[in-house]
């Protein structure tokens, strides 16, 4: 019976890994490099999540659980402890400016929309926005970069109007990292929480998916556009909600520690003709 459960899980992961492998091959990453990453993850999780009474799992037990040799486990634990595999996706000054322009009272109108900002001024200006939230980037340099990325319109009088709330990293690798760390990882981590064998009904995280098997080809374009618009509206509402709690003294500041919270919204349409599964 256990073997049957294991096969079901592995079959599902073979499907999940198809887009992963597409990304790896796109970036010239082969099996050997990926295998090293997978082994490192096995040792990391085996060491930290399966200990007894809160203690890290010893090398011999990790070797038994993962099927790796003790020598390999020891090597990978040393690698993990060195911190060389830590994933870092930092918030850039541009991302911070775009977010604050849409959320800070000083820079939005009475309807909550991003205001047209004069370039100079001590209060309610583009320069004051950059000085507050742009780190050590000069306002002029920030304006130049936002214009280059086609994120702002500059009027004849020099005032600036932001065009989009979404900021996609211009570098494809940075964009991929952001999607994986802020999209794929939270979804899979939530799935782990919600599928624990001893999970009591109602104690899990919010995770909702809806699907249809009978959308005609001619209707897909319209459905995709409508879904995009609705998901965009929801993303904006959650962004506003998170910003409110970030500024609230009842949030993490009161507790003395911070937590990462994320909400994911997506539209999926199968475009891989070789993906083998049944809804």
Image: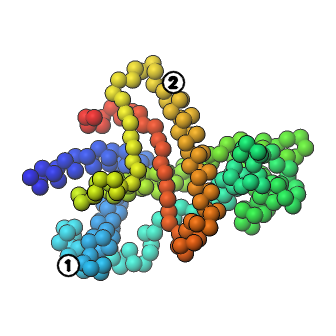
Residue 57 in view: no
Residue 18 in view: yes
Residue at 35% from the left image edge and 48% from the top image edge: 21
Residue at 9% from the left image edge and 52% from the top image edge: 1
Q: How is the image coloured?
A: rainbow
Give the left or right position of residue 181, taking residue 117 as reference.
left
Q: Residue furthest right?
A: 157
The C terminus sits in image quarter: top left
The image position of residue 272, as x and y in percent, is 36, 35
Residue at 58% from the left image edge and 66% from the top image edge: 250
Q: Secondary structure at mark 2?
A: helix
Closest to the observer: 184 or 252?
252
Disc 1 target residue: 60
Closest to the observer: 276 or 279?
279
Please report whichever mark, 2 or 1, sits nearer to the chain's N-terminal start: 1
Give the left or right position of residue 187, taking residue 138 as reference.
left
Disc 2 target residue: 222
- 177 versus 258 height, above or below: above
Residue at 56% from the left image edge and 49% from the top image edge: 238
Q: Secondary structure at mark 1?
A: helix
Query: Is disc 1 surrounded by few (<14), some (14 to 19) or many (20+) residues within 10 Å?
Result: some
């Amino acid at each position: 019976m256990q073997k049957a459960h294991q096969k079901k899980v592995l079959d599902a992961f073979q499907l999940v890994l198809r887009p992963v492998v597409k990304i790896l091959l796109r970036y010239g990453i082969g099996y050997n490099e990926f295998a090293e990453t997978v082994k490192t993850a096995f040792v990391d999780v085996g060491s930290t999540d399966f200990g007894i009474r809160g203690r890290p799992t010893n090398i011999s037990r990790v070797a038994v659980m993962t099927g790796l040799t003790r020598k390999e486990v020891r090597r990978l634990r040393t690698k993990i402890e060195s911190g060389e595999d830590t994933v870092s996706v930092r918030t850039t000054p541009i991302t911070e400016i775009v977010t604050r322009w849409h959320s800070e009272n000083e820079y939005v109108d009475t309807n909550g929309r991003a205001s047209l900002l004069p370039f100079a001024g001590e209060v309610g200006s583009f320069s004051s926005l950059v000085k507050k939230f742009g780190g050590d980037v000069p306002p002029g340099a920030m304006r130049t970069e936002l214009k280059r990325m086609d994120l702002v319109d500059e009027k004849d009088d020099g005032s600036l109007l932001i065009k989009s709330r979404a900021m996609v990293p211009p570098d494809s690798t940075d964009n991929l990292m952001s999607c994986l760390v802020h999209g794929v990882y939270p979804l899979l981590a939530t799935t782990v929480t919600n599928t624990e064998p001893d999970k009591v009904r109602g104690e899990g995280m919010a995770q909702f998916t809806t699907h249809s098997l009978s959308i005609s080809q001619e209707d897909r374009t319209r459905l995709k556009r409508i879904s995009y618009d609705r998901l965009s509206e929801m993303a904006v509402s959650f962004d506003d909600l998170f910003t409110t709690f970030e500024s609230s003294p009842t949030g993490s500041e009161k507790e003395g520690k911070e937590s990462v919270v994320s909400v994911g919204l997506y539209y999926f349409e199968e475009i891989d003709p070789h993906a083998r599964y049944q809804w």
